[in-house]
Image (cartoon, coloured by chain):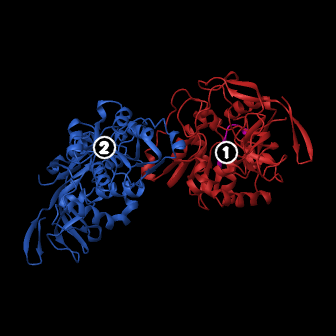
Chain colours: A red, B blue
């Protein structure tokens, strides 16, 4: 059933009765395959009192979603079989039954992987559309805050220190390296999985040194890049990188454990860092983080990072996959490192 | 050449011209063997101005000494081949050319593994001999401070939390468990390598639960001992224990990395904790420690732990090997877990 919504006298829109959604069809063993997902046409719910209906414009695909595809207890509950894969999204209100939200308002919310989302208005955050909407899924959103809080609050980074970031061409990693430089790091080293990304890190993002981890043992390449060692390691990948970083960390060094994308699809347990006992003599600190613990930092983050954005001092890369039907392709590409910077899906592409 | 020393008119002693010392004869590959050490008769040096000559009464043998037998850069320099294996010792001054030190004074110093030590007086600490001298090598010394600082300062232990200690029957471990109980832990679990030690932990030291890690997988035994998980893990052994603890640690749990005795004699790298990525979602902190960073805590430590000692609330176990010629035997026994509590050598035994 189609229905019309009067938009404060400005326009009149016809809303579709159905919209497309991506469902979890099967729990993957190891690497997910397209057959683990199902594209479903589902009824669009009219907003009840206090709700809004949003047409999504950009969807976020993120590494943590791989973990939610498994049926295991974790820090976020698993996706349910046969249900939509939630995720961060930005879009515009197309129907509102909530005070304070008008048709046309740009909002950030958590009901991604679908074209239309009906949700309680208090679960949506109105955002300023003077900036590109998709930046709220990246540099000014959870991605940016993860980098900011991880480097500064968890990693305790101080000006003059040397920083190493893995997954450096990714959404979080590219922010970590730039924030470190802008905050006065003596050396910023990044690793990535292609020569093209490596070139981008040094030529566009201001990393001092970068290397392609596929070109040789990480420990050897890191020793060449930072012969005097590092003070903070921001870990997005786990595995061999973490072991190399433990070797390179100096006295009282810190490792921020933020992601382990290298092993998300392993069906057997990965190899742990065999040199962890070095942490004793060097008094290293390894600490896991989730951005949700650091929301108190949000105002400082927006002020500082927003300032750098306004001054044009921050490069934020995006890889935008065009078209809602390519969401799974975007997600699988992300897991294989096909993105540079934040990986997004443009719904209408 | 024998020489006499006038002891402020009190006694007159004849000092020997030579004393025995244990030297490092060869760098071990894997487990040390008796042939890696040499018992050497060496001249006793008369104290120069500002020095004292000490007859050692008790020697400390410690796990960290195994690391110093390797020729690798570490937090303490390696022992030199053909030189004495230094280590903690307590004894009495038998000749003094230093102000403030008289013959008969009890002192703590760092020139162990020998019968007689000649050293600058400012490298010796005079100790109160109302307490057994050997306690300065254990409960009131670096051993006790390691436990105290590791649990409270590095581990950030709070009353009401659950604690797991490996190597719990060892010198540091047995103190950690007792301090945790005395400071209000909700649960203290210890692991050790024999049923006799396990019995001692619960029946004499006040641990709530203890298990023999040789009796089954550590993770399974720990899950049984602490079904609701733990908040602080004090790691003396590394390896399988650390992996089990990472699994059992609750949100925001801490692992104090103090020792890795399980792997000191490995010639191949040990297996690292394969589940380290759990630290992300649980926001765990793993932190290495050396007691030398925590000397500022010494006054608080002596006041609190000395108080518990005086009240008889602290059990401190010692394993005393009698006789200087058995020092190597004591050390090798320590590495194999033959001790309960602090392992000591009584020089005159």
What residue is pinned by disc 1?
A168
Quarter of the image where one finds residue B95:
bottom left
Query: Circle 2 is placed at which residue position?
Result: B167
User: For this rendering, which residue is in front, B26 or A336?
Assistant: A336
Looking at the image, the residue that sits furthest to the left is B11
In the drawing, does residue B269 fall left or right of residue B26?
right
Relative to the observer, which residue lies in front, B68 or B246? Answer: B246
In whole angstroms, how far apart are the C-alphas of marks 1 and 2? 40 Å
Instruction: Provide the secondary structure element on which disc 1 rests.
Output: loop
x, y (%) of residue A54?
A: 79, 41
Mark 2: which secondary structure? Answer: loop
The image position of residue B123, as x and y in percent, is 29, 67
Of all residues, the one furthest to the front in this rendering is A49
Q: Is residue B90 visible?
A: no
Viewport quadrant of the N terminus of chain B: bottom left
The relative height of residue A35 versus residue B187 in the rendered view (above or below) is above
- Could you say where residue B52 lies in the image, as x and y percent from the top left? 22, 69
Q: Chain of mark 1?
A: A
Question: Please, which chain is the residue tagged with disc 2 on?
Answer: B
**Residue nearest the observer in this picture, B260 or B174:** B174
Residue A16 seen by the camera: yes
Residue displayed at 27% across by 37% down: B193
B168 inside magenta stretch: no
Structural crowding at the residue carrying mark 1, measured as other residues with C-alpha within 10 Å and reported as few (<14), some (14–19) or many (≥20): many
Note whether A198 is above or below B86 in the view shown: above
Q: Residue at x 22, y 40 (%)?
A: B197
In magenta, the rendered stretch is: A189-195
Between marks 1 and 2 in the image, the one whose residue lies nearer the viewer: 2
Residue at 52% of width from left, 41% of height from top?
Answer: A243
Between residues A67 and A201, which one lies in front from this camera angle?
A: A67
């Amino acid at each position: 059933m189609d229905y019309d919504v009067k938009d404060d006298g400005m326009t009149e829109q016809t809303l579709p009765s159905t919209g497309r959604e991506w469902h979890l069809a099967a729990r993957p063993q190891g690497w997910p395959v397209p057959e683990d997902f199902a594209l479903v046409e589902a009824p669009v719910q009219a907003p009840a009192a206090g709700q809004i209906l949003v047409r999504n414009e950009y969807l976020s695909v993120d590494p943590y979603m791989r973990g939610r595809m498994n049926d295991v207890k974790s820090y976020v509950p698993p996706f349910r079989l046969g249900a939509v894969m939630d995720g961060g999204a930005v879009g515009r209100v197309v129907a509102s039954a909530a005070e304070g939200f008008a048709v046309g308002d740009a909002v950030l919310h958590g009901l991604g992987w679908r074209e239309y989302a009906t949700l309680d208005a208090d679960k949506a955050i109105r955002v300023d559309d003077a900036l590109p909407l998709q930046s709220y899924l990246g540099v000014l959103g959870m991605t940016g805050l993860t980098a900011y809080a991880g480097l500064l609050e968890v990693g305790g980074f101080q000006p003059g220190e040397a920083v190493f970031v893995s997954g450096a061409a990714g959404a979080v990693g590219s922010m970590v390296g730039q924030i470190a430089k802008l905050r006065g790091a003596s050396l910023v080293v990044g690793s990535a999985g292609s020569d093209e990304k490596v070139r981008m890190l040094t030529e566009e993002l201001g990393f001092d040194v970068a290397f392609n981890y596929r070109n040789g043992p990480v420990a050897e390449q890191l020793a060449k890049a930072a012969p005097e060692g590092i003070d903070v390691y921001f870990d997005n990948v786990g595995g061999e990188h973490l072991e190399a970083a433990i070797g390179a960390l100096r006295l009282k060094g810190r490792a921020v454990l933020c992601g382990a994308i290298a092993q998300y699809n392993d069906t057997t347990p990965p190899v742990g860092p065999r040199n962890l006992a070095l942490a004793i003599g060097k008094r290293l600190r390894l600490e896991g983080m989730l951005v949700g613990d650091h929301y108190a930092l949000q105002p400082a983050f927006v002020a500082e990072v927003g300032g750098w954005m306004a001054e044009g001092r921050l490069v934020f890369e995006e890889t935008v996959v065009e078209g809602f039907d390519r969401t799974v392709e975007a997600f699988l590409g992300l897991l294989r490192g096909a993105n540079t910077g934040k990986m997004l899906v443009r719904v209408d592409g």
